[in-house]
Amino acid sequence: VRMVFMGPPGAGKGTQSNLIKNKYCVCHLSTGDMLRAAVAAGTPFGKKAKEIMDAGGLVSDEIMVGMIRDELENNQECQRGFILDGFPRTVPQAEKLDEMLEQRGQQLDHAVELAIDDALLVSRITGRLIHAPSGRSYHREFNPPRVPNRDDVTGEPLMQRPDDNAETLKKRLATYHKQTTPVVGYYQKRGIWRRVDASKSPAAVWGTLQAIFA
Ligand code: ADP
Ligand code: ADP
Ligand code: ADP
């Protein structure tokens, strides 16, 4: 599987990526997770990235393309296939991705849009808890960890993302509609775009995805 996952914040990209990764043994590249790792490392770049993320904006195309290029070239797990979660978020990112893949003699199999109404995202985002080192996500109500506030795998504490509040969500959604929605048109023209109803349960969404990959 070589695919990109599109969808607004909270649509379920990370949750479904984990299922796909485990079934198909492909790498899961989440640009949000990569940026949060840079923020946690406290580098000068991380500090700049944090400001942008907390404001609900986008980090520059150049930096994001560089991060993905690095992974595709050096991460062995990506040889078998990949899930790009949260990338591309702009048309220039999508164009650069095509160039990179073309140079490698590869192409995308699917561009899946997890489509969902903005109104349903507030509760998903404000209830989200993450295990920062792995990127695993839980939900206070919809997918609670077995031990409250502890990761089910490592037992480590879970945290809420600083940008997961109602006010920043509004800005992130505005950014999504303005800058990322045009990417749908880009993949529609290429004939690889699929729209999946992301308002359904995680299991129902997973069923639809498996049918697409089969
Ligand atoms: P979500 O899970 O809510 O969709 P992500 O974890 O993918 O959000 O991204 C968090 C933030 O990181 C974004 O709001 C944006 O500021 C930044 N970011 C992530 N991916 C990209 C990208 N491809 N281009 C630019 N900025 C990005
Ligand atoms: P994204 O990566 O697109 O931002 P996540 O996969 O992190 O989204 O999901 C956002 C939040 O909603 C998480 O707390 C997750 O546990 C929860 N969630 C994911 N999929 C569903 C679903 N189908 N129904 C309800 N809650 C969900
Ligand atoms: P500075 O913040 O002064 O640019 P850094 O060493 O933090 O110094 O980053 C240098 C460059 O390396 C960044 O501009 C960015 O392009 C890239 N970079 C930084 N962090 C990461 C990361 N986690 N993954 C991939 N590339 C990164």
Image (cartoon, rainbow, N blue to C red):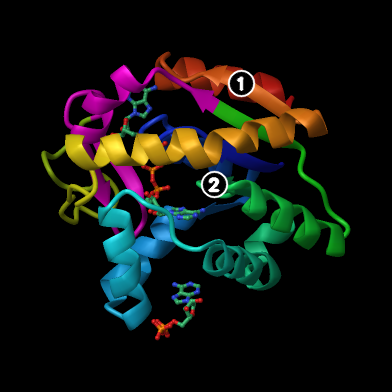
Q: Residues within 10 Å of mark 2 (few under 14, many from 20)?
A: many
Quadrant containing the C terminus is top right
Q: Residue furthest right?
A: 105
Q: Which residue is mark 1?
A: 195
- Left or right position of 65 against 189: left
Instruction: Kindly identify the amino acid type of the residue bearing the numbered disc 2.
Output: Arg
- The answer to whether residue 47 of the structure is visible from this angle is yes
Ligand 2 quarter of the rendering: top left
Q: Which residues are magenta?
A: 114-143
Bin the neighbour count of mark 1 within 10 Å (Cα to Cα): few under 14, some 14-19, many 20 and up: few
Any magenta on residue 130?
A: yes
Percent across and percent down for residue 153 are 29, 49
* Point 13% across, 39% down: residue: 147
Q: Residue at x 59, y 17 (%)?
A: 208
- The numbered dot on residue 121 is none
Residue hosting label 2 = 89
Marks 2/1: CA–CA distance: 16 Å
Determine if the magenta segment contains residue 42: no
